């Protein structure tokens, strides 16, 4: 089911900001496409009352803001929702989402954060909730819930820096569930701020799989995310040629530069143009 006029991210870079750090609110908004004001993990338990008060007293653009609230069933959860209702924010991120009822209970447009083993096993049911407008996944709480110690291969291991297979499975499952229910999907944060090449590679992969956005924890990561989601001129040129060729061939199969172009390839080309915001000002191309 779909939420009427559901919010969608206005850009691909979503930056977390602790809700008790009001001096960072506007700076984060100036740097990123979306700010996730965090009432959960980024705020020490003894600071959460102050964080909620700060959230209410220091408004920023609600069209570019998500509020991450604590997991359902915790005392902070209800207090977080009460605080959000005193603001103009209309989108929340439900930490450690594990069932449909916890999503519906927010009565707000909700991004379900899948980061526990139980949430991962129920992701398709969660994605179907009418007020679930998108999904995100998280690796570290997931691995903690498994009793593990690391979501990624470490130094000296064959795939150092890359996600271990269970994390990759949840990442894939979340993406598929989001697509199956026509909800947007947000890729997880890259915690190693200095590992730019790793971030760039993950963003490239996220784009190839149709993720809408990637979350981040540091402003320096924003431009790498934006660059990764922005199609190159060559990609846009190819996509326009595919779309034009499909029109010329009345939607039938044809070849372009030796490649067979059919329905799935056409849809991929259309996705490139959508990401580029290509409504007219495109690179010149030859027939």
Image (spheres, helix red, strand yellow):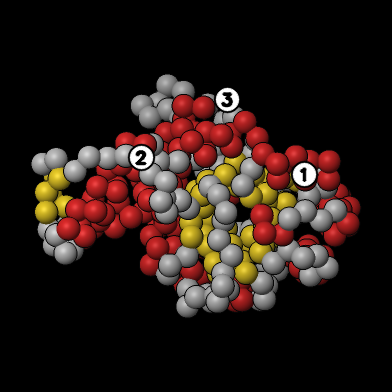
Sequence-first tag of 3 and 2 = 3
Residue at 62% from the left image edge and 31% from the top image edge: 220
- Residue 64, percent across and down? 66, 54
Q: Residue furthest top?
A: 156
How many other residues sit within 10 Å of disc 2, few (<14), some (14-19) or many (≥20)?
A: few
Q: Which residue is mark 2?
A: 283
Q: Can you tell which of label 3 and label 2 is closer to the viewer?
A: 2
Q: Position of residue 108 (x, y in %)?
A: 66, 72
Number of numbered markers:
3
Q: Is residue 149 visible?
A: no
Question: Which of pointers 1 and 2 indicates the residue nearer the eye?
Answer: 2
The residue to which callout 1 is attached is 26
Mark 1 burial class by Cα count in 10 Å: few <14, some 14-19, many 20+:
some
Q: CA distance from mark 1 to mark 2?
A: 35 Å
Above or below 25: residue 155: above
Residue identified by numbered label 3: 194
Q: CA distance from mark 1 to mark 3?
A: 24 Å
Q: Is residue 73 above or below residue 21?
A: below
The residue positioned 63% from the left and 50% from the top of the image is 34
């Amino acid at each position: 089911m779909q939420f009427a006029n559901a919010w969608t991210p206005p850009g691909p870079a979503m930056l977390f900001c602790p809700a008790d750090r009001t001096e960072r609110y506007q700076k984060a908004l100036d740097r990123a496409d979306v700010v996730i004001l965090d009432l959960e993990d980024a705020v020490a338990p003894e600071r959460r009352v102050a964080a909620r008060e700060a959230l209410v007293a220091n408004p920023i653009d609600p069209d570019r803001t998500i509020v991450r609230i604590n997991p359902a069933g915790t005392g902070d959860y209800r207090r977080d929702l009460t605080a959000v209702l005193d603001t103009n924010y209309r989108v929340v991120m439900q930490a450690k989402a594990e069932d449909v009822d916890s999503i519906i209970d927010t009565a707000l447009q909700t991004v379900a954060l899948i980061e526990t083993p139980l949430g991962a096993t129920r992701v398709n049911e969660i994605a179907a909730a009418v007020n679930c407008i998108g999904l995100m996944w998280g690796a570290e709480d997931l691995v903690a819930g498994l009793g593990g110690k690391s979501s990624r291969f470490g130094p000296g291991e064959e795939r150092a820096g890359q996600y271990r297979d269970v994390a990759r499975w949840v990442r894939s499952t979340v993406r598929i569930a989001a697509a199956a229910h026509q909800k947007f999907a947000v890729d997880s944060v890259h915690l190693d701020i200095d590992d730019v090449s790793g971030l760039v590679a993950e963003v490239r992969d996220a784009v190839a799989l149709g993720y809408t956005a990637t979350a981040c924890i540091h402003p320096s990561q924003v431009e790498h995310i934006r660059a990764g989601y922005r199609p190159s001129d060559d990609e846009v040129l190819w996509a326009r040629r595919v779309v034009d060729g499909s029109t010329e061939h009345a939607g039938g199969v044809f070849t372009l530069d030796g490649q067979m172009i059919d329905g799935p390839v056409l849809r991929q080309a259309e996705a490139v143009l959508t990401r580029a915001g290509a409504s007219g000002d495109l690179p010149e191309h030859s027939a």
